Image: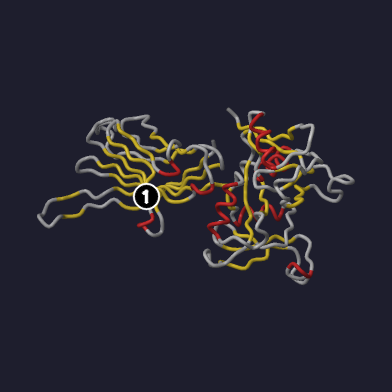
Amino acid sequence: MMSLLCITVIALTLAGSAFGQVTIPPFQLTVKVYAELGANVTLPCGSLSSNGPSFGNVGMRVKWTKVAEDESLNEDVLLSMGFHKKSYGSFEGRVFLEEIENNDASLTLTDMSMEDTGKYRCEIINGMVDTMQEVSLEVLIGFTEGVVFPYHPNLGRYNMNFNVATQACLDQDAEVATPEQLHEAWKGGLDWCNAGWLSDGTVQYPINHPRELCGGTNNGPGIRTYGRRNKTVNYYDVFCYTSALKGRFYWLVQPDRLTFDEAVQACVDDGAEIAKVGHIFAAWKVENYDRCDAGWLADGSIRYPISRPRKNCSPEEAAVRLLGFPDKSQKSHGVYCYRAEQ
């Protein structure tokens, strides 16, 4: 795990109450943490008093919250009161308190995703002295190998608003790519003429070989952008991002061609599942998987991955080739499967 801490103390003040008594407001500490995609990271938080009761004490309360710009949209992460602890939503089952020392309320998040980026608030409530700390978490790309890929479902091009596009990536074991990820993919040679959603709500597309139908030839190579679009009423494709596989992607040898339903069942019978689009791109990019056989994938598409361009198998470039979305009832192709790590 790699993480860097940059700590800035914001404020510690004493104020008189209306009755002339001195009260101690929460101590607020801001911390910046960087973490690898897919790794675990610990967000630091601790009580100011080293002599106070432990977090197992019933009187001690710890609350972690993911803070949104609109506080009404804040997400509960974890609540601890004595020996009772509860995690919430997408954090359920993958967050826990370190509790290395009595005054340690640091939170460990496992299996980091880009969606975990944001500001987190730790509140320790302990009698008269309360502590509040904020941690800004940024999940970085580049530490874990991955791949950006353009995607559209069988409905055709430009049929997804932002929410539908987000779900489309999730359905393919991926997430909506960030502008930074698309930029890195463009530097790596990605050239795609169809505009797609990115995680910040902008719509962009990468061009390495300028041509008339893709923004013209005068602008040169670069990333074309439509800027921020209306997430509800505007419809585009999407750029997804997926990282290294946590399982095995493979071609299932079968004596006959299969319908889609037969392909799904064949993978199940082999102790696996039919592979998703994110699986085939990760295997192709990260593992240099190469096979010239076109096969069914979970979204009903037919694709095959070529890392060694050759005649009759993507002769000009390494790529994941898409043959379309055929009639699922036809015995047209074989199948790619995916078996997750146990």
**Residue 257 x %, y %:** 78, 38
**Residue 292 x %, y %:** 82, 41
Task: Determine whether the residue tagged by mark 1 lies in a helix, strand or loop.
Answer: strand
Q: Residue furthest left?
A: 19
Q: How is the protein colored in the picture?
A: secondary structure
Q: Is residue 208 left or right of residue 18?
A: right
Up the image or down, 269 lies above or below 169; here it is: above
**Residue 231 x %, y %:** 53, 64
For residue 90, which quarter of the picture?
top left
Q: For the N terminus, which image quadrant?
A: top right
Which residue carries the number 1 mark? 9
For residue 191, which quarter of the picture?
bottom right
Up the image or down, 194 lies above or below 65; here it is: below
> Does residue 26 appear in the picture of this structure?
yes
Q: Residue furthest front?
A: 329
Q: Residue furthest right?
A: 311
Residue shown at the point (76%, 42%) measured from the top left: 331
> Does residue 305 appear in the picture of this structure?
no
Dot 1 amino acid type:
Val
For residue 209, which quarter of the picture?
bottom right
Of residues 53 and 261, the one nearer the viewer is 261
**Residue 286 x %, y %:** 70, 40
Number of labelled discs?
1
Residue shown at the point (20%, 41%) measured from the top left: 127
Of residues 261 and 300, the one nearer the viewer is 261
Q: Residues within 10 Å of mark 1 (few under 14, many from 20)?
A: few
Up the image or down, 190 lies above or below 131; here it is: below
Q: For the C terminus, which image quadrant?
A: top right
Of residues 162 and 191, the one nearer the viewer is 162
